[in-house]
């Protein structure tokens, strides 16, 4: 009897401490901006929510959507604009975003000051290097429309991701499209001085889009709402800690990417915090949420780059029910 009671107690304790295994798909490699998720692991924030989180790198935002749609990963980090296009097909899995991370998207036009490009119209008469699959280049028609650029006066050169910044540094193209913090750091690595780099953030010039968000598989969310709430809550805590002390947060990333240059990734992280994680809207409303009216405007803008057949509504794309109260989401 005592042994049976012991076993019963043992299994009760084991179940009380059981962790739900979660696979989380990033959009890209383990670089500086990914630090908050590893902070949440190292500081036990996921564990406190009953989650045992494993993070895998990715090779682009669309891949993350496909991974989550397949159910291989319950959570992913992906470009919400790609998700909007994906959701246009009613046959696709009804994935939703549950936590906005990049309130300001990293989409940008990057040039060297010597090119004379200081504002959008200056791109006319120039050569723009843009990988065909680049998320920033996908927004080019919106940027053109918002700034009344004569696109016929801009030569578009399809360049590969690995040679994009080297070609700009070598003067083979006048400007490039890209995620600004990556292009900025890559140009520095190619010997370009920071003061010689011009960055035109698309959001500053009429491209009213959001950026990357945490997305969730709908079947998982329906079956495990508390796990989704816990994942969102723990991630926000990781982001808050990262904003407070990026110098400490970067150590969690470096544990997983020993070949990375700490100074480079720390700077990349600080740049992302400064322009993408934290915006005037975030300082006012807190981390993680969206303005549904702004999201509706962005859906309309995406119509300049994509022909809708079943245009989704903002409420179908973003689900804010898993977010904690605003006071728990402040960016301090």
Image (tube, helix red, strand yellow):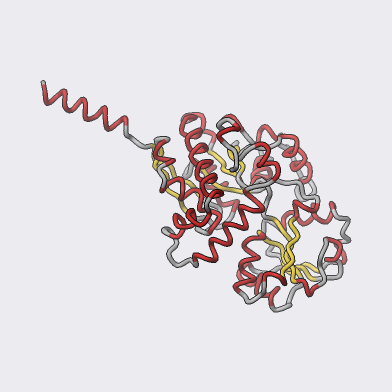
Residue at point 56%, 53% (across, down): 27
Residue at point 67%, 32% (across, down): 315
| Residue 209 in sight | yes
Task: State the residue in front, 175 or 299.
Answer: 175
**Image position, residue 50 (x, y; %):** 39, 35
Residue at point 60%, 36% (across, down): 94
Q: Is residue 7 left or right of residue 171?
A: left
Residue at point 63%, 77% (across, down): 191
Q: Which quadrant is home to the C terminus?
A: top right
**Image position, residue 294 (x, y; %):** 75, 39
**Image position, residue 238 (x, y; %):** 50, 45
Can you tell which quarter of the image residue 194 is in? bottom right
Task: Check the image and report above or below for 6 versus 41.
Answer: above
Disc tally is 0
**Residue at the extreme top:** 1
Q: Is residue 171 left or right of residue 52?
A: right
| Residue 92 in sight | no
Q: Which quadrant is home to the N terminus?
A: top left
Task: State the residue in front, 249 or 83.
Answer: 249
Q: Is residue 135 left or right of residue 246?
A: right
Task: State the residue in front, 247 or 5.
Answer: 247
**Residue at the extreme bottom:** 170
**Image position, residue 72 (x, y; %):** 47, 44
Task: Check the image and report above or below for 189 versus 178.
Answer: below
């Amino acid at each position: 009897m005592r042994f049976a009671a012991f076993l019963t107690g043992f299994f009760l304790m084991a179940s009380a401490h059981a962790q739900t295994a979660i696979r989380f798909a990033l959009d890209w490699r383990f670089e500086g901006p990914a630090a908050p998720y590893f902070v949440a692991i190292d500081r036990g924030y996921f564990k406190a929510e009953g989650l045992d989180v494993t993070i895998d790198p990715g090779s682009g935002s669309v891949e993350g959507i496909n991974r989550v749609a397949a159910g291989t990963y319950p959570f992913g980090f992906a470009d919400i604009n790609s998700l909007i296009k994906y959701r246009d097909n009613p046959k696709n899995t009804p994935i939703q975003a549950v936590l906005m991370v990049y309130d300001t998207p990293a989409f940008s036009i990057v040039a060297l000051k010597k090119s004379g490009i200081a504002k959008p119209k200056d791109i006319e008469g120039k050569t723009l290097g843009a990988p065909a699959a680049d998320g920033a280049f996908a927004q080019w028609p919106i940027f053109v429309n918002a700034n009344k650029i004569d696109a016929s006066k801009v030569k578009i050169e399809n360049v590969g991701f690995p040679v994009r910044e080297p070609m700009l540094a070598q003067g083979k193209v006048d400007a490039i499209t890209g995620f600004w913090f990556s292009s900025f750091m890559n140009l520095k690595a190619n010997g370009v001085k920071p003061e010689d780099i011009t960055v035109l953030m698309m959001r500053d010039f009429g491209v009213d889009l959001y950026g990357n968000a945490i997305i969730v598989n709908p079947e998982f969310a329906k079956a495990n709402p508390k796990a989704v709430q816990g994942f969102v809550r723990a991630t926000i805590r990781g982001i808050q800690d990262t904003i407070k002390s990026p110098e400490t947060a970067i150590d969690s990333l470096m544990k997983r990417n020993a070949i990375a240059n700490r100074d480079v990734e720390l700077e990349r992280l600080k740049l992302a915090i400064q322009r993408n994680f934290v915006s005037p809207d975030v300082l006012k409303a807190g981390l993680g949420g969206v303005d549904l009216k702004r999201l509706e405007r962005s859906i309309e803008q995406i119509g300049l780059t994509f022909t809708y057949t079943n245009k989704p509504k903002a409420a179908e794309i973003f689900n804010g029910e898993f977010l904690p109260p605003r006071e728990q989401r402040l960016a301090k």
